[in-house]
Image (spheres, rainbow, N blue to C red):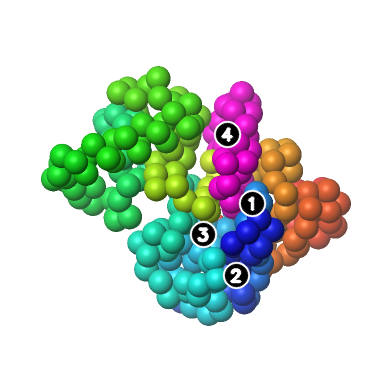
Amino acid sequence: PQPGQPLVQVEHAVKQFGGLRAVADVSFEVRTGEIVGLIGPNGAGKSTMFNLITGVNPATGGTVTIAGRNVTRWRAADIHRLGVARTFQHVHLLPDQSLLVNTMVGGYARGRAGLIASLLHLERAEEAALQREALRQLRRVGLDAQTFNLAGNLALGQQRVLEIARALMADPTLLLLDEPAAGLRHGEKQELVTLLRRLRDEGVTVLIVEHDMDLVMNLVDRVVVMNYGEKLAEGAPHEIRAHPAVREAYLGV
Ligand code: ADP
Ligand code: MG
């Protein structure tokens, strides 16, 4: 889709876990070229929403449309192939492997099990292509000087950036980030914001879950607020800051 056109359309999405409605009739859009923030208290349903959009754990009701395709029942691997990548709320790196290997892993739209095994069984040409792509992404995020360092040696901020490099393998058009600044120091947060702005300028549309309100409000074009599985509000950062129900439910003021 062209800039400004809908890239993700979530319509009346529902996710039921037994008796719990983790997502209850939520609708919103992400347009091409935007950075959209998805905020809300713990348990609001934000990570569950990411799982609906990425096919990790599909909706039990409503629809998810990406780039004009109804992907509501698609498998995660097929949604990934459509150009959707994500990071997870908790760091998912292989600490005893190099940054290069950790990034190459993103070239597989598979589960974690057997990832290293599949890397070991690659054809030489395939492996070289994957390495080139991983090096390109490490350069893109500014971690190339540490290509052969072990992921476990990195500071948390750099581990988060490494996860982004891995997600960028195969050049997604949509990047979903689940609390990428959690636990980061101020300087690391600033670097993350700079990186995400640059990725947006390079054509990557971003949907970000983040608790640091200053970071979110300073970074995003639009904010969607969830609370108890429902959409509480949506708007520009200044509208959300001033929204009475949001202030009460989330900002605690
Ligand atoms: P958030 O990311 O906004 O903190 P989550 O999406 O993780 O919230 O969770 C929303 C609600 O759904 C919570 O009550 C959580 O316990 C529940 N939940 C999330 N995943 C599952 C699951 N796989 N099975 C059962 N309940 C779940
Ligand atoms: Mg979460």
Image location of residue 194, percent across then percent down: 62, 32
Front position among marks 3 and 1: 1
Residue type at numbered disc 4: Leu
The image quadrant of residue 90 is top left
Residue type at numbered disc 3: Phe
> Does the magenta-highlighted stretch encompass residue 174?
no
Q: Which residue, given by chain and number where applicable, does mark 4 sit on?
A: 195
Q: Gap between marks 2 and 3, in whole Å?
A: 11 Å
Q: Which mark is residue 50?
A: 3
Q: Residues within 10 Å of mark 3 (few under 14, many from 20)?
A: many
Residue type at numbered disc 2: Val
- In terms of secondary structure, where does tag 4 sit? helix
Q: Depth check: 120 or 232 in front?
A: 120
- Mark 1 or mark 3, which is nearer the start of the sequence? 1
- Mark 4 or mark 1, which is nearer the start of the sequence? 1
Q: Depth check: 2 or 47 in front?
A: 2
- In terms of secondary structure, where does tag 2 sit? strand
Q: Which stretch did the figure color magenta?
A: 181-210
Front position among marks 1 and 2: 1
Question: Disc 1 vs disc 4: Cβ atoms closer than 8 Å?
Answer: no
The CB of the residue at mark 2 lies under 8 Å from ligand 1:
no
Q: Which residue, given by chain and number where applicable, does mark 1 sit on?
A: 33
Residue type at numbered disc 1: Gly
Residue located 53% across and 66% down the image: 66
Q: Which residue, given by chain and number where applicable, does mark 2 sit on?
A: 10
